Image (spheres, helix red, strand yellow):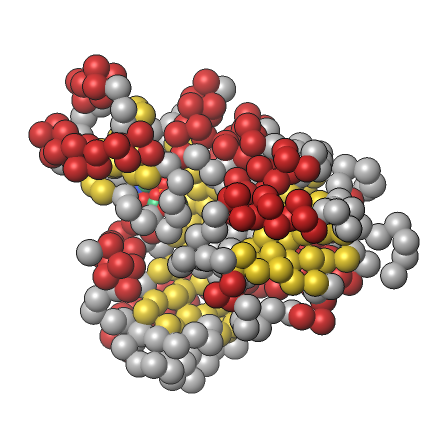
């Protein structure tokens, strides 16, 4: 290994990021992985990892003090050049460690813009970016003023969650006060915002030195909230490039990432296109999108966001980062929970199918085509078939909510 190689400490409270780890290793970095004790035996790409460390966890939750003590101990014998959070929930741990050890990268203030849904709203709104009306679920007179200003329905939402967990739709002011009371002292960890009826879009980006180097816009078939809370089939497909919607959402995405201050890395950001056609900013993150969106983007563009992120981290603002131009194809992703333990997808045999999900009680695939229309056709057709072939009646996420 060249002596100039970097030591990259990856944090992964959940099991993910293999392609990041492999690419960082391939680039000559010394990769250290910190993960949850409960994931000790998971199939990590061990050939690419120099050393692994385990943090005691309860359901993947770590005590920050354990992490800081453990990594500080490690830093007695290792010079750590980068700290990379592979999961959304690892972002603030990474920034706390960077601040503690004075390691370059995103600090606590900027990290908040990519984790805390209230912070991202406040900063985006003050930069003139359109956002749903919102209020911190805390000060009573401000909440009353919000209710008078913004007609229901509203969404009551935790500031730090993901996967639509803990979000409730509220129909009137009495229901809001009772929901806020139920939260007790936890209420300050929530915000209330206008429900914007419309399509939910996402833009997946690679950023280097504040410049968006690659951005791909897609649209969910059904808004994620409806899938998580109502069940059914999750789909997303790339937007047709160069259409007014594509151009507009990419421009809004550029403004959002600039306003929130992402210097380098990857981002999965979401937008709602209301019934009147106008776009509002929904949320952003500084990570690779979950739910197999990385595989979707790779199918369409040939770019693996995890691997590109490793290359961005290695360049680190000190060297040029060059990315191969994305292939201009289209792709669509479809996933649902399945009644069957190992659903049989063999009847989904069109030549455009390039990826199949291998996960118990799940059915999923990705199609790829140079034609946007063809992808739309296939995903519409497969959605109908998935609903009868596989869909389980009670979605797991709803179970978890109840
Ligand atoms: N203000 C809103 N108006 C309409 N739908 C919303 C709103 N906020 C959230 N949603 C719905 O809930 C889903 C999850 O919300 P989001 O803020 O993206 O949190 P998460 O981090 O859980 O993905 C969205 O994809 C969308 O379907
Ligand atoms: Mg979301």
Viewport quadrant of the N terminus: bottom right
Q: Residue at x 61, y 64 (%)?
A: 18
Q: Is residue 316 left or right of residue 202?
A: right
- Give x and y (percent) for residue 336: 34, 67
Place residue 174 in its image quadrant. top left
- Of 190 and 381, the residue lying toward us: 190
Q: Is residue 96 visible?
A: yes
The percent position of residue 386, horizontal first and vertical second, equals 31, 72
209 over 364 or under it: above or below: above
Image point 49% across, 19% down: which residue?
127
In the displayed structure image, the side of residue 1 where residue 181 appears, left or right: left
Question: Measuring 16% from the left and 32% from the top, which residue is drawn there?
Answer: 181
Tell me where residue 307 appears, x and y as whole percent: 67, 57
Q: Spot the residue most to the left.
A: 174
Q: Position of residue 13 (x, y in %)?
A: 51, 56
Image position of 260 (left or right of 165): right
Name the quadrant of the C terminus.
bottom left
- In this view of the protein, can residue 172 be seen by the observer? no
Q: Quadrant of ligand 1?
A: top left
Q: Residue furthest right?
A: 3
The residue shown at (46%, 57%) is: 57
Q: Is residue 323 left or right of residue 384?
A: right
């Amino acid at each position: 290994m060249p002596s100039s190689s970097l030591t990259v400490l990856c944090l992964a409270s959940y099991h993910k990021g293999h392609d990041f780890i492999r690419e960082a290793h391939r680039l000559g970095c010394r990769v250290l992985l910190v993960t949850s004790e409960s994931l000790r035996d998971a199939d990590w790409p061990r050939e690419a990892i120099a050393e692994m460390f385990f943090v005691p966890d309860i359901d993947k939750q770590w005590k920050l003090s354990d992490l800081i003590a453990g990594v500080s101990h490690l830093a007695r014998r290792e010079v750590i050049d980068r700290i990379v959070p592979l999961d959304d929930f690892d972002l603030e741990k990474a920034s706390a460690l960077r601040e503690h050890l004075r390691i370059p990268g995103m600090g606590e203030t900027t990290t908040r813009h990519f984790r805390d849904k209230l912070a991202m709203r406040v900063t985006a709104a003050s930069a003139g970016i359109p956002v749903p009306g919102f209020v911190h679920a805390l000060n009573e007179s401000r909440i009353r003023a919000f209710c008078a200003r913004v007609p229901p329905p509203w969404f009551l939402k935790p500031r730090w969650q993901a996967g639509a967990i803990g979000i409730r739709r509220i129909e009137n002011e009495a229901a809001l006060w009772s929901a806020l009371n139920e939260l007790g002292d936890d209420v300050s960890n929530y915000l209330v915002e206008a429900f914007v009826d419309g399509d939910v879009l996402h833009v997946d980006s690679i950023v280097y030195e504040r410049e968006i180097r690659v951005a791909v816009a897609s649209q969910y078939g059904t808004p994620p909230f409806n899938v998580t809370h109502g069940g059914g089939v999750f789909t997303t497909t790339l937007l047709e490039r160069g259409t007014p919607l594509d151009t507009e959402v990419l421009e809004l995405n550029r403004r959002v990432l600039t306003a929130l201050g992402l210097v380098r890395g990857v981002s999965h950001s979401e937008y709602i296109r209301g019934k009147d056609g106008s776009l509002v900013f929904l949320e952003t993150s500084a990570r690779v999108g979950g739910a197999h969106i990385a595989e979707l983007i790779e199918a369409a563009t040939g770019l693996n966001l995890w691997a590109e992120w490793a290359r961005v981290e290695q360049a680190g603002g000190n060297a040029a980062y060059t990315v191969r131009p994305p292939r201009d194809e289209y792709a669509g992703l479809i996933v649902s929970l399945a009644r069957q333990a190992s659903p049989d997808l063999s009847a989904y045999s069109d030549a455009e199918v390039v990826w199949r999900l291998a996960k118990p009680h799940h059915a999923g695939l990705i199609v790829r085509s140079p034609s946007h229309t063809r992808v739309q056709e296939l995903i519409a057709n497969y959605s109908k078939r998935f609903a009868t072939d596989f869909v389980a009646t009670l979605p797991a996420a709803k179970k978890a909510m109840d």
